[in-house]
């Protein structure tokens, strides 16, 4: 055997058979007095480290020297907005080589990237990332006895090896796009029932009452919902118990109408007393998507505010299968359960005008021609439309929706199917929606404005309804509401039961009920809908309410 090879092998065996010696100390800057230590067989490097932790205006610096493994040797930054920790390291592999004090290698300059962070009130605050923080992060910590989600910026080194993150953080997930860590923002989850303010109403009329949340709820929410149809806007305020996954700002813009939700969430009793401003901009952002206007789906829509995605969806809000297109926010694309009920098969894309594929509003043949319009009373200016082959009637409708003392009346003219033609009322106590319709089957026959046919007088029948605290409240039915009803809604992430009065037309054909309600059951005796009542969540009742008004 070659002598040089023998020497190399002997040296390797000798080095592998003994342990490394390193300097060891830990202390604040300037007082790290080292002592010699013999490393364990697992250690293969000597490390010198500088840890800089900033909380608000306060910065602390820690120096350490120790035995380590080479895999841990890297510079990292972990920035949660309220707290940032930077770790600068130098490593070497000869005895007592780690005598130096390491400088702070990590920059404090913004790098242009932005991520969400949590400030104790919400997890939708924007954080400017610093230095090499080129990833957004979400994690859970049990540092306190409360389970807490934290968000912020971090370096690739932590995302590549989550064991490098500070101790006490679990379930780390990283992403690279700006503000990509917005989904499922949790502040804290309590082991006892939260108490929240609860109300729903048009702006200025939302008078809160205290409610004890179900065990499924982990946040108090305050929301402002602005729905625009043409030149008409309606603003609703809501306060309620909710789940933190639902907490976020969102906008859904289909051209013919737009709905914006601005929310703030918190997790202490009765913390949702504020009225949330409308956070979502109405300024064009330069992005464009296709939208449908009832004739075709190749119209160009200028997206507004944070609407940075194009969307395509199918709706069964009417009896006709309909495709809708438009602009939306990332929050809805990330969590399609946040979209209004009644919309299915949602698909999102990011390029300009990317939602062009398979855009069908209706399948045309030689068919009926009807007047078409939708608007508040007096503003419904009709245009002629050619109906799909599925439509067999022209419909004219008046929809009156009442919340507390506030009523909104909408007029609509459209193509429809004769099975949908009827008068109906859906009364769940906290709101009532009445639809009066007339149908005809000759071209452009639906020119009239339909009066409100449905009476507001008590008819002597009584049913249970839910008020946010219990479902054992008695409701006096009105007009032709001769059935009691019970249904489940998935409008929020919490399972919710609604109860009230309704008309036979809805019980005979449950597809005529407002969208977003499932498992409808009807009965005819007084107070017959009392079984298995659960507390109601009110927050996104505004979604089906407005979409029922605008589209039904």
Image (cartoon, rainbow, N blue to C red):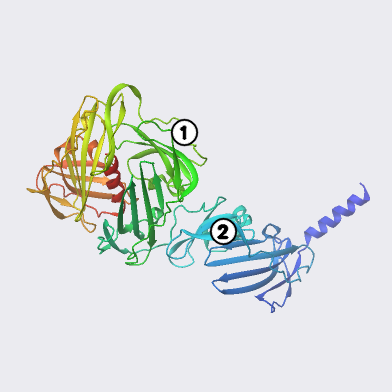
Q: CA distance from mark 1 to mark 2?
A: 35 Å
Q: Residue at x 67, y 72 (%)?
A: 63
In this orientation, which residue lies closer to the viewer: 92 or 113? 113
Left or right relative to 353: residue 433: left
Q: Secondary structure at mark 1?
A: loop
Determine whether the residue tagged by mark 2 lies in a helix, strand or loop: strand
Which residue position is annotated with label 1? 356
Disc 1, disc 2: CB below 8 Å?
A: no
Could you classify mark 1 by the number of other residues whose Cα lies within 10 Å: few (under 14), some (14-19), or many (20 or more)? Answer: some
Q: Residue 29 at x, y = what percent?
A: 67, 76
Q: Quadrant of residue 315?
A: top left
Up the image or down, 441 lies above or below 493; here it is above
Can residue 335 be seen here? The reply is: yes
* Residue under the image location 49 percent in, 37 percent down: 353
Q: Which residue is mark 2?
A: 153
Residue at screen point 36% across, 56% down = 243
Location of residue 25 by image quarter: bottom right
Rendered residue at 42%/47% (across/down): 332
Q: In screen coordinates, is 102 left or right of 532?
A: right
Relative to 320, residue 428 above or below: below
Q: Quadrant of residue 319?
A: top left
Considering depth in this image, is 270 or 225 the residue closer to the camera?
225
Check the image and name the residue furthest to the bottom.
31
Q: Quadrant of the C terminus?
A: top left
């Amino acid at each position: 055997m070659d002598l040089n090879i023998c020497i190399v092998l002997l040296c390797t065996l000798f080095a592998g058979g003994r342990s490394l010696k390193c300097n060891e100390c830990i202390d604040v800057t300037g007082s790290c007095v080292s002592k010699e230590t013999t490393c364990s067989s697992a250690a293969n490097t000597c490390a010198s480290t500088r840890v800089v932790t900033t909380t608000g205006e306060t910065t602390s610096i820690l120096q350490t020297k120790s035995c380590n493994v080479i895999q841990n040797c890297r510079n990292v930054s972990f920035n949660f907005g309220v707290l940032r920790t930077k770790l600068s390291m130098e490593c070497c592999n000869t005895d007592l080589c780690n005598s130096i004090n390491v400088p702070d290698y990590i920059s404090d300059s913004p790098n242009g990237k932005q991520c969400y962070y949590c400030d104790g009130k919400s997890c939708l605050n924007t954080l400017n990332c610093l230095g090499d923080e080129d990833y957004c992060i979400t994690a859970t910590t049990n540092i306190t006895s409360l389970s807490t989600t934290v968000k912020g910026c971090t370096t690739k080194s932590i995302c590549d090896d989550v064991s490098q993150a500070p101790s006490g953080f679990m379930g780390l997930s990283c992403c690279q796009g700006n503000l990509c860590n917005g989904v499922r923002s949790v502040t804290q989850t309590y082991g006892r029932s939260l108490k929240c303010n609860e109300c729903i109403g048009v702006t200025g009329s939302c008078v809160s009452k205290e409610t004890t949340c179900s065990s499924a709820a982990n946040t108090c929410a305050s929301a402002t919902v602005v729905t625009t149809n043409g030149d008409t806007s309606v603003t609703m305020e809501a306060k309620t118990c909710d789940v933190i996954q639902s907490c976020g700002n969102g906008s859904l813009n289909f051209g013919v109408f737009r709905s914006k939700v601005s929310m703030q969430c918190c997790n202490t009793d009765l913390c949702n007393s504020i009225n949330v401003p409308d956070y979502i901009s109405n300024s064009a952002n330069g992005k464009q998507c296709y939208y449908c206007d009832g004739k075709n789906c190749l119209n160009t829509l200028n997206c507004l505010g944070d609407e940075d995605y194009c969307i395509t969806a199918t709706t069964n809000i009417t009896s006709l299968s309909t495709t809708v297109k438009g602009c939306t926010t990332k929050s809805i694309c990330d969590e399609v359960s946040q979209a209004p009920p009644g919309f299915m098969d949602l698909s999102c894309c990011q390029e300009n005008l990317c939602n062009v594929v398979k855009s069908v509003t209706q399948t045309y043949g030689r068919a009926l021609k009807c007047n078409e319009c939708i608007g508040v009373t007096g503003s419904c200016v009709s245009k002629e439309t050619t109906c799909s082959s599925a439509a067999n009637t022209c419909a004219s409708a008046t929809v009156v929706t009442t919340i507390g003392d506030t009523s909104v009346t909408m007029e609509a003219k459209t193509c429809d199917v004769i099975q949908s033609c009827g008068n109906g009322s859906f009364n769940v106590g906290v709101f009532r929606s009445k639809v009066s319709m007339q149908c005809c089957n000759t071209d452009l026959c639906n020119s009239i404005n339909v009066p409100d046919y449905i009476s507001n007088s008590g008819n002597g029948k009584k049913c249970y309804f839910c008020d946010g605290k219990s479902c054992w409240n008695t409701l006096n039915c009105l007009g032709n509401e001769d059935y009691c009803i019970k249904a489940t809604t998935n409008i929020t992430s919490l399972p919710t039961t609604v109860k009230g009065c309704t008309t036979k037309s809805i019980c005979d054909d449950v597809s005529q009920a407002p969208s977003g309600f499932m498992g409808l059951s009807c009965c005819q005796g007084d107070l017959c809908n009392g079984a298995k009542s659960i507390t109601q969540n009110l927050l996104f009742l505004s979604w089906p309410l407005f979409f029922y008004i605008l589209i039904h």
